Amino acid sequence: MAKIMYFLTVFFIILHVPGIFTEQENPDACPIRKFNPLGQTCQKACTRNQECGLKRRCLCDGDCGLSCVTTTRSCPWPVNIANAKTGLVKGTRNFGDQMSVLCHPGFKMASGQETALSRCQGDRKWSVITPCDVLDPVKSCDVPHTIENGFLMENGSTFSVGTSVHYQCNLGYALEGHKVTQCMENTTWSQPAPTCRQIFCPPPPEVKHAYLLAIQKSEYAVFEEINYLCDRNLDMDGSHNVTCEANGNWSAIPICRTRCKIPAQRSRVVYKGSKRWVHEIPGTVHHLEAVTFFCLNQTCSYPATSQCFDGILSLPSCYEEPTWIQYNFFPKNIVSEITPCTEL
């Protein structure tokens, strides 16, 4: 994998360096010879091959311009450059061939580059042999302060200038102070570390017709639970178990509801899935329980349901209470006893 990455990097450099492979073939693209080019010994200047003799050719030699060079001459190999890896682009090291220079991670050249191509010159020297030096150290802040009952949302041991970190408190604690702080140019944090304050709930409220099963305290910790119980013959609407939540409030408080009496006396009703006379139903109907009555539709009966809600069970508007005579002498003619309309 390392070799693959190396050759991909070299290929990328070649694609993005202008003028590669063109200076020698196109004399017009060759620069004018500089006087005493830095780090290079120039060969005889020329304009065409005839000026160079039999063994040399008039080719572009970098800053030396068009020069008489021996193409079979080679540059030294291998080449060791401090803190860098070198490689031959084509596998050869003759005049005009190229060597890649890749600085090791954390190093760069004096020019600021981390990669470069070096060319084999007419004087049999490589054009670039600049060592790679260590990068300028990045300014960073000390590790942010930890907080009791809280934590930093970012991990790491190095926090460079401009980096922001976020504090968060554990469940059951509220953050006081600044949630976010940033590493500034002077390598200090912009805000002091916050604190985490424990959250408490106040004493639970009283519930009418109920009593509390809990130790009486002035405050209750998050997730602490209490229980309510309704007085006898009352139904609890909601959960009897109440919890102190993370926002400092209690979960839903229950209500004690009154049970209902069935307002009919001389009829059969459907209660808890069975049809029975009212006097056969013991006690009262629980809160939210349903009772089905029967109404008259000419010669047949149809059901009409009513629900108990906090002591009130209303008779359906279509319901008519049988008379004492009907109930005692003609019970089979009572509406609840005649043929249902669904069977006709």
Image: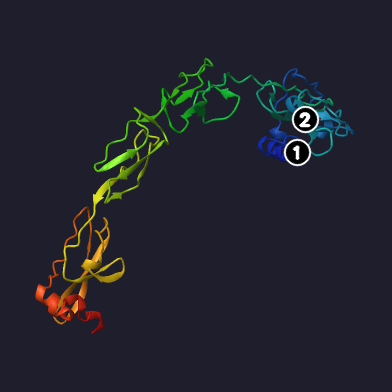
Residue at (89% x, 33% y) in the render: 55
Residue at (23% x, 54% y) in the render: 259
Res 173 label: none
In the depicted view, which residue is nearer to us: 187 or 73? 187
Residue lying furthest bottom in this view? 344
The image position of residue 231, as x and y in percent, is: 27, 46
Res 2 label: 1
* In the displayed structure image, the side of residue 119 where residue 314 appears, left or right: left
Identify the residue under disc 2: 85
Q: Which structural element holds mark 2?
A: strand
Which quarter of the rendered picture does the N terminus lie within?
top right
Total tally of numbered discs in the picture: 2
Q: Of tags 1 and 2, which is closer to the observer?
A: 1
Which quarter of the rendered picture does the C terminus lie within?
bottom left
Report the Cα–Cα distance between label 1 and label 2: 12 Å
Residue lying furthest right in this view? 54
Q: Amino acid at mark 1?
A: Ala
* In the displayed structure image, the side of residue 50 where residue 298 appears, left or right: left
The image position of residue 80, as x and y in percent, is: 82, 25
The image position of residue 241, as x and y in percent, is: 37, 43
Q: Quadrant of residue 248?
A: top left
Q: Amino acid at mark 2?
A: Lys
Name above or below for residue 195 compared with residue 332. Answer: above
Can residue 88 be spotted in the picture? yes
Within-10-Å neighbours for mark 2: few <14, some 14–19, many 20+: some
Residue at (14% x, 80% y) in the render: 330
Within-10-Å neighbours for mark 1: few <14, some 14–19, many 20+: few
In the depicted view, which residue is nearer to us: 276 or 20? 276
Q: Quadrant of residue 251?
A: top left
Q: What's the colour scheme?
A: rainbow
